[in-house]
Image (cartoon, coloured by chain):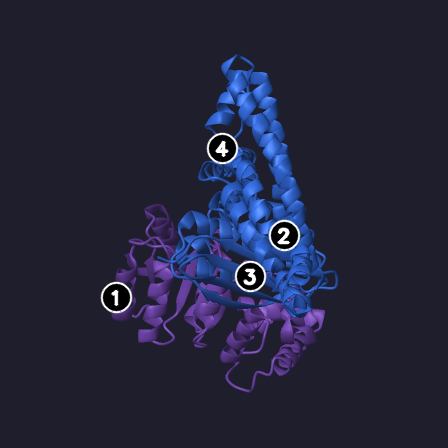
Chain colours: A purple, B blue
Amino acid sequence: MRVVVAEDQYLLRTGLTRLLAPYGVEVVAAVSTGPELLQAMVSLRPDVSIVDVRLPPTFADEGLRAALAARQECPGAPVLVLSAHVARLYARELLADGGGGVGYLLKDRVFSDDDFVDALERVAAGGTALDPEVVAVLMAGRGPLERLTPRELDVLSLLAEGRSNAAIAARLYLSGSAVTKHTANIFDKLGLAQSDDNNRRVQAALAYLNGQPL
Amino acid sequence: MRTRWDALWTLVRLTGLSLLTLLVAGLTVTSLAATLIGLPGMAVSVIENGRTLTERYRQGLRDLGHPADSPYLPATGDDVARLRAMLTDPATWHDLVWMLTLPVTGVVYGIVPILVGPAAVASVVVVGWWAVPVGLALCAATVFAGPWLLRQHHRFDLWLLRPTSHSRLAARVDQLTESRTLASDDRTAETRRIERDLHDGAQARMVAVGMTLRTAERLVETDPVAARALLAEARTTSAAALSELRALVRGIRPPVLVERGLADALRAAALDCPLDVTVHIELTDVPETVAIAVYFAVCELLTNAAKHGGGRHGALEARQDDVALRVRVTDDGRGGADPSGAGLTGVRQRLAPFDGSVDVASPVGGPTEITLEIPCGSS
């Protein structure tokens, strides 16, 4: 897998490169500013880019903006955004184009490299990976989510994290067919029409974040 | 009609009062003379009596809704010091002038209602019965002019009795001193909390990580299994340290505020609120210190709404015009919020250094509407 890393802190940049090497992930470019990231994403077309939200020169949300700009130029270009904190607002912006291939995780998640690489692969394949903290307990009963059963809410929150049906089944000790049934019910209750599965999963995550229909 | 008669009666009473003030003014002047022969204590008590009289009059003006707050500068120390403070306080002289002029104005304004009745009777007696309509018209005109006369009188009173520019400044200094003390106490408590959190939390955990890593390093060849378990433990501990640091940072300078500014930080807060919050924000430029205070204030209000309100929907509005920044947080919960409760007092204290105010409307049964106003206009 070819990866661009945008991270201004040297320790984290080299740490990431070292952490990913055993998994056959090749860092084709390591950049440290927003404009460099935009250029690298457009010219190198990596399988996925790992982006820190806060980058020089502004140290505001430079990385996030550059990633969003790159996705406008190359729709669907996979981006995994890392940050020292997560905000639901940013997750919503990243998912907003509905294209998938988006990840948004706390930096600490790189500690469990298996999970992290799994998330990276999901994003590269056009799926999603949202941090459990972004998805974390919204009070049950907001808008259309009210119509979901507690079990369906459990399934939806894992779905919003970007987990596959198999992963959800394993996590909740359910059979594969039970999960399929739950997801079908969720899509139905949220009014998500038939379309390709990835897309519906992104829409479900957005609905979850908004707590209301799209 | 009732108020018209009241106005006339008040004017008549004012005429009576004027005789009293004349007496007090006379005493004041006499006592000031007395100080020249060494009786400052007497002068002080006479001035104080005069103040008691004018203060009572001010209370009356305030009851009518006039801005007649007490104008006196503080006077402390021994008699000489107090007398000096009183004599250099413009309010003392304003009082004296008012007491001396009230007899004149009182008579001028009061004489009309007092004399109109007799004048009407007299004109009938002198001129004859055909003057009756004229007399009645005069009386009616007086009754109708009463409130106007009284207003003119109060205008004159206020001119002399309202707070002087000195006392307004003094009051402002008091207010600023208080809010500054509150703010710096707050800050001290805040830094103490941060220091303790770092010391007992992240710092302690990083020490543990270092020790665990060192032990693992030593065991790596002799007991790889134990070494691996220790390494995993070090990883868990450092994750816990990070999550504590994250919570701490959020309490100091909220990340979204730093990255995006107040408008998006408020949107993010509304999104995190368990209520379904509609957001409307029009902000141009808010200084960062104000932004941080407003952000935490709004977070507190949203949390309260979700925790105590028991409603389902909320609204957050923030607007800035060239005078002030106004934020309104509403919810459809059960209302009955206590304006002097810990939460709202905290909000008020947060905004105090910026002269911000908090207005609470929360009838029992709801809805609750809380408005923050900070005099920080867009430039």
**Which amino acid type is marked by label 3?**
Arg
Point 49% across, 49% down: residue: B293
Whether residue B278 can be seen here: yes
Q: CA distance from mark 2 to mark 1?
A: 71 Å
Q: Marks 4 and 3: in contact by CB < 8 Å?
A: no
Disc 4 marks a residue whose amino acid type is: Trp
Residue B119 in picture, x, y percent from top left: 64, 57
Q: CA distance from mark 3 to mark 2?
A: 31 Å
Q: Chain of mark 2?
A: B
Q: Nearer the viewer, mark 3 or mark 2?
A: 2
Q: Quadrant of the N terminus of chain B?
A: bottom right
Badge nearest the viewer, 1 or 3: 3
Q: Are marks 4 and 2 on the same chain?
A: yes
Same subunit, labels 3 and 4: the answer reads yes
In the picture of the structure, the residue carrying the numbered disc 1 is A39
Residue under label 4, please give it: B93
Q: Which residue is mark 3?
A: B328
Q: Earlier in the sequence, mark 3 or mark 4?
A: 4
For the residues labelled 4 and 1, the Cα–Cα distance comes to: 77 Å
SS at mark 3?
Answer: strand
In this view, the mark in front (4 or 1): 4
Asked if residue B170 is positioned above or below residue B271 in the image, the reply reads above
Q: Is residue A88 left or right of residue A185?
A: left
Discs 2 and 1 share one subunit: no
Name the N-terminal-most of marks 4 and 2.
2
Residue A91: image x %, image y %? 48, 65
The picture quadrant where one finds residue A101 is bottom left
- Label 1 chain ID: A
Q: Of the residues tagged 2 and 1, which is closer to the observer?
A: 2
Q: Characterize the local packing of mark 3: few (<14), some (14-19) or many (20 or more) Cα atoms within 10 angstroms.
A: many
Which residue is disc 2 drawn over? B64
Bin the neighbour count of mark 4 within 10 Å (Cα to Cα): few under 14, some 14-19, many 20 and up: some
